């Protein structure tokens, strides 16, 4: 079998008598697909613009454990406010009111009910505690806060 080629205005063309095997044809058909995936992989690998420090900072900001510790620190601050509020005067008021209507001669007798009843109670409670007692409670809350802050710092290091 004689191999030959023709030159045309378009370029090199193999002559019709050259036959490619089926294996070569499938490989040639797959070249554009393979090159497309390789190009995509190379572009994805080269587009890495952030460094490791960025991802470490994002992990610390988005960590549910660190958020939990910061929420527990905030809850301890609220606890100290509650301790402070409990030792201030507590004022309570309550009232009980009744009305006994008499409409066109029907209803409750005015002489028996006086038309209704009103009562009201106001109470003020003050807790007395020594300064040492308050300081001990505040110290306990402060130790809880410091513990949560320390656990948060340890988990950031991990």
Image (spheres, rainbow, N blue to C red):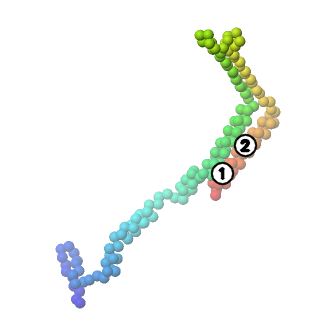
Quarter of the N terminus within the rendering: bottom left
Above or below 65: residue 6: below
- Image location (x, y in percent) of residue 145: 70, 45
The residue pinned by badge 1 equals 152
Residue lying furthest bottom in this view?
A: 1
- Label 1 Cα crowd, 10 Å radius (few <14 / some 14-19 / many 20+): many
SS class, disc 2 = helix
In the displayed structure image, the side of residue 120 where residue 105 appears, left or right: left
> Count the marks: how many?
2
Check if mark 1's residue and mark 2's residue have beta carbons within 8 Å: no
Q: Residue at x 73, y 43 (%)?
A: 142
Residue furthest front in the image = 106
Q: Report x, y in % for residue 125.
A: 76, 26
- Classify 55 as above or below 138: below
Q: Earlier in the sequence, mark 1 or mark 2?
A: 2
**Residue occupying the point 64% across, 46% down:** 70
Name the quarter where the C terminus is drawn. bottom right
SS for callout 1: helix
Q: Is residue 57 visible?
A: no
Which residue is labeled 2 in the image?
142
Residue under the point 75% across and 24% down: 124
* Residue 63 visible in image: yes
Q: To which quarter of the image does residue 117 belong?
A: top right
**Is 49 placed left or right of 81 in the picture?**
left
The answer to which quarter of the image holds residue 86 is top right
């Amino acid at each position: 079998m004689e191999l030959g080629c023709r030159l045309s205005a378009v370029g090199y063309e193999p002559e019709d008598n050259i036959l490619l095997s089926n294996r070569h044809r499938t490989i040639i058909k797959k070249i554009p697909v393979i090159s497309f995936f390789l190009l995509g992989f190379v572009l994805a690998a080269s587009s890495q613009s952030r460094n490791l420090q960025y991802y470490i900072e994002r992990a610390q900001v988005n960590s549910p454990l660190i958020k939990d510790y910061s929420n527990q620190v905030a809850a301890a601050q609220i606890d100290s406010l509650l301790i402070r509020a409990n030792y201030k005067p507590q004022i309570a008021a309550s009232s009980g009111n009744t009305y006994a209507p008499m409409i066109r001669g029907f209803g409750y007798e005015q002489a028996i009910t006086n038309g209704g009843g009103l009562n009201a109670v106001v109470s003020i409670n003050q807790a007395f505690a020594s300064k040492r007692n308050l300081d001990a409670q505040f110290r306990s809350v402060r130790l809880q806060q410091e513990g949560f802050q320390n656990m948060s710092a340890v988990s950031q290091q991990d």
